[in-house]
Image: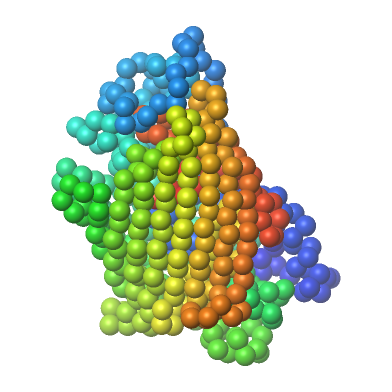
Amino acid sequence: MRDFLVPHPTLPPSKRRNARTELRWSNARRFPALSILAGALALGLGPVWFAFPAGAAADPPADPSAAPATNDGSLFFDPKDGWLDISGFLATKAGFLAVPMIMTEPTLGYGGGASVVFVGPREGRGAEGFKRPNITAAGGVATENGTRVLFAADLRHWLDDRLKTVAAVVGGRVRLDFYGLGHDRVLRGNPLEYQLKIAGLRIGGKYRIGKSSWWVGASYQFFTVAASFAQVLDLPIIRRLNLGPKRTRLSGPIVSIVYDSRDTIFTPSSGLFSETTLGTSWEALGGTSTYQTLDHVTLGYLPLSETVTLGLRGDLKRGLGDPPFYVEPSIDMRGVPARRYQGKSVAQGEVEVRWQFWRRFSLVVFGGSGIAWADGTHFDRSESVHAGGIGFRYELARRFGLHYGMDVAYGPDGGTFYFQLGSAWMRP
């Protein structure tokens, strides 16, 4: 746990940093400040609802695509096996998830919040309507270091599933530490504490190419961001990155191409998701500066047996031009503090195995590595990290393919734990 922007009254900076890292086990959640849709859809944390069967024998793990499109029985128990299942409730017009959030992310400190998530299956689409439902979410979070964020987002399908639209807004302030880009000898042990005051929106959509699994997307983002540092040292890197207090505007289009054959967006057991995204900010559209960000992610899910799923993830990220320091990419995986390892370029990979060993219960084992480097063409001043851990899941909504549980991860900065609603790699 770190105390941001609140200096210890007696300890020198180096010992303050060590004191902050004494409490390393935490319930963390990724919080990329500008990825508003991911923040709205992936920040949800909620209680684990476990129940024992109400008389019926349990079936093997169910394929969501084979599930019936109508609710036949209790809103909170599955008629097939008698176990607790909220598919029926979510499928009603009033169905929603009230999701409490418990935050002890090392980057943000202890805190909490709540969100309301409406997950509505699309009428007339059968099992496909449960695998890729319409989603609306709104909520807020606050932590002890002064972070305060409100968000809302909506994902909706149109034109017989040929068009998906996304609209999201976010506002608040986030307090973080800046460790430099790649391996920075000066800032690695003495990071700069900073605050971002953020307000903005993102709207856009994706259109399916024919009847294939390929999509093309376009959206527009506009943010105002006020960045300020607790202290700014007179160092060459500080002058080069121009880290003084400033207010900036990010304004520009985002284009993407996507391939998606997953069996569900929540906790996939098979299929492939691959997305390449070019984000921009243009002075001509009201941005403070012109720059680009290039991101590629591939997620693969391979069923090794009826109960075992192998998951593979690979990411490449690159900042082009001269983006603000808080936009530069960072390593983002379980066991690694949010925004801790930044660079002009980032590459990372993860492996996950999920074994549904008994009825609705699963065991998860995962691990990965990432590297961030400061120069886009050479690996000088690079910083590499490795992290891994174990977790468990409960199949909370069979017809949606939605599992819930907890992961315990250990990385270079210690141990963390995460409550997971859906996949840790979930992409809507």
Above or below, comparing residue 137 to residue 306 in the picture: below
- The residue nearer to you, when weighing 12 against 360, is 360
Above or below, comparing residue 49 to residue 321 in the picture: above
Above or below, comparing residue 123 to residue 168 in the picture: above
The structure residue drawn at horizontal position 30% and vertical position 63%, both measured from the top left corner, is 256
Q: Residue furthest front?
A: 304
- The residue nearer to you, when weighing 315 against 397, is 315
| Structure colour scheme | rainbow
Above or below, comparing residue 393 to residue 339 in the picture: above
Q: Residue furthest right?
A: 10
Q: Left or right: where does residue 256 sit relative to residue 334?
A: left
Q: Quadrant of the N terminus?
A: bottom right
- The residue nearer to you, when weighing 397 against 137, is 397
Q: Left or right: where does residue 403 sit relative to residue 164?
A: right
Q: Left or right: where does residue 418 sit relative to residue 80?
A: right
Q: Residue furthest top?
A: 55
- Where's residue 120, x and y in %? 31, 36
- Where's residue 149, x and y in %? 49, 57
- Where's residue 116, x and y in %? 43, 42
- Where's residue 397, x and y in %? 42, 30
Q: Quadrant of residue 21?
A: bottom right
Could you tell me if residue 86 is visible in this image? no
The structure residue drawn at horizontal position 25% and vertical position 53%, both measured from the top left corner, is 214
Could you tell me if residue 255 is visible in this image? yes
